[in-house]
Amino acid sequence: MAKIDYFTEERSAETVNARMGKAISPRLREVMTSLVKHLHSFVKDVELTQAEWEASIDFLTRTGQMCDAQRQEFILLSDTLGVSMLVDAIQHRRPEPATENTVFGPFHVDGAPILDMGANISLDGKGEPCLYEGRVLDLDGNPIAGARIDVWSDNSEGFYDVQQPGQQPTWNNRGVFITGADGRYWFTGIKPVSYAIPDDGPVGEMLSALGRHPWRPAHMHFMLNHPKFERIVTHTFVSGDFYLMSDAVFGVKDSLILDYSPSISTEVKWKADFDFWMVNKNSQKLCHLKAVEN
Ligand code: BEZ
Ligand code: FE
């Protein structure tokens, strides 16, 4: 008679994984086998107590209960544990000089107005005006026409419009710009300020229990889309910001730190010049094919 594989401390992960059906998706098998293996190994490593296990279940329950259409506490948990940045890094390994991605964050809103080049996205008139300009290029340095650039930032008090409905004008510090044949973009916004991520829920509790702060260094968000090029989701960070070395969500990369320089124009106080380098989707496919061949 076949030996029954009852659950034991020693073989716990193997026993759980052996229960999987034969005809399941190979990827699901791969992911779940590893998840169970690492989860069991973590519990063994720290010898998790019953009280700690109950506190973990309560923490995850409250994290779920905090979520609604406006608030995604689980993404915040992933962000603050560095998981969002790790998934992004693995999925978006790009050749030089392509622009690097960073964390998407919860404050992007679909459907922002498409504006004429040069428009001012700061609708509340607060903050220090800044001219953002640059080019959208392929990896050979050719301009890309028809790139859709979605931009969003906090206001001068450190809040996105969606965090202060009724207080800030709708679409404050947001807009979409589409490049012409020269690949250039330019618009006026404000020099963003550093702000704390929402910390009034379980993630905030976790950060303070760990002696961590909830602050992000000042940044302007950009998302670039073009049918022929890989999407870029990124920020430009303000050089010299106090929180560059301790971003609560680990989003800072050297290549994304930008000097916001004083402007000589009387209309804006600052200038932020940044070129975006996009990867052609076909060249990515070729790279992949070469990697598979070798
Ligand atoms: C943001 O930059 O908007 C953001 C990113 C991650 C968590 C919270 C906010
Ligand atoms: Fe942000």
Image: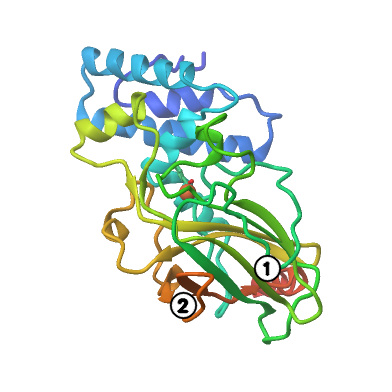
Image spot of residue 173 (x, y percent): 57, 50
Q: Residues within 10 Å of mark 2 (few under 14, many from 20)?
A: some
Q: Residues within 10 Å of mark 1 (few under 14, many from 20)?
A: some
Q: Please tell me in which quadrant of the rendered image residue 149 appears.
A: bottom right
Q: Which residue is mark 2?
A: 263
Residue at 72 percent of width and 70 percent of height: 289
Left or right of 198 on screen, residue 51: left
Q: Is mark 2 within 8 Å of ligand 2?
A: no
Image spot of residue 120 (x, y percent): 63, 59
Q: Nearer the viewer, residue 207 or 236?
A: 236
Element marked by disc 1: loop
Q: Is residue 81 above or below residue 148?
A: above
Color encoding of the figure: rainbow
Q: Please tell me in which quadrant of the rendered image residue 147 appears.
A: bottom right
Q: Nearer the viewer, residue 117 or 135?
A: 117
- Which quadrant is the C terminus positioned in? bottom right
1 or 2: tag closer to the N-terminus:
1
Q: Which residue is mark 1?
A: 118
